Image: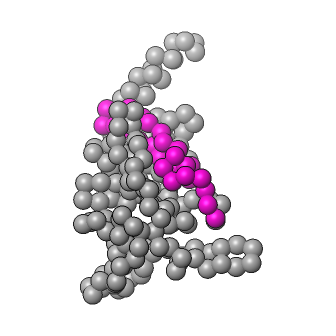
Amino acid sequence: LLLACLPSVQNAQAEAFAPGNDLSLLFDPPLRNIQSLAILEGHLVIADGRNLHGISPAGATSTLPIAQALGPVQQPAYRQPVLVTGDSSLYLLDLQSGQLASLSLGEGGLAAGDLVQLDWEDYITRYEHYNEVVPPKEFAIAGGSLYALEGQGAPLLPFDLASGQKRAYSSTKA
């Protein structure tokens, strides 16, 4: 009976994804704790606490460990990944550490590119036994900058994508 079911499992892995499909079942083990998702060149990219998962329009999957993109976990000892879209690019931002890595698609699926440490100290409050991080709420990338929105009605705060340094707040409030 098991051998009779095996071909249908392989076919399910190769099928294109469509609305209503349980995408977590394309992976072994199934995806849990999904924290962010975005589109990169027609591929769905999903971030959980440990990995980035890519699904092509044809249903092919790939996995990239977040540690490969951002390096070892820093303090605090966990990650809070967010995928941030740009003009025609995709970035992985760790809200806890302020690390930002560019993402691309290679022959084997997702690949990590340049890594920059954002000027993130203003968002970290250090206590004796732990650190509390209160990062901005929303992000967008355009024209060589990561724009952060710290709160409703606040001015946009740009970070330089090459150096990670904060620039002056924009005069326009969001």
Q: Is residue 33 visible?
A: no
Residue toward you, 59 or 84? 84
Q: Quadrant of the N terminus?
A: top right
**In the image, residue 17 lies at what x, y percent?**
35, 37
Q: Residue at x 32, y 50 (%)?
A: 39
Q: Residue furthest right?
A: 129
Vertical order, 151 against 34 (above or below): below
**In the image, residue 79 lies at what x, y percent?**
57, 59
In this picture, which residue range is highlighted in magenta?
48-75
Q: Residue at x 29, y 60 (%)?
A: 86
Vertical order, 18 against 81 (above or below): above
Residue 118 falls in which quadrant of the image? bottom left
Q: Residue at x 40, y 77 (%)?
A: 166
Along the horizontal axis of the image, is 117 left or right of 15? right
Q: Is residue 29 magenta?
A: no
Residue 150 falls in which quadrant of the image? bottom left
Q: Residue at x 47, y 46 (%)?
A: 52
Q: How many marks?
A: 0
Q: Residue furthest front?
A: 163
Residue 55 falls in which quadrant of the image? top left
Residue toward you, 54 or 30? 54
Which colour assignment does the render follow?
one colour
Q: Quadrant of the C terminus?
A: bottom left
Q: Is residue 70 visible?
A: yes
**In the image, residue 64 lies at what x, y percent?**
48, 42
**In the image, residue 162 lies at what x, y percent?**
36, 64
Along the horizontal axis of the image, is 76 left or right of 158? right
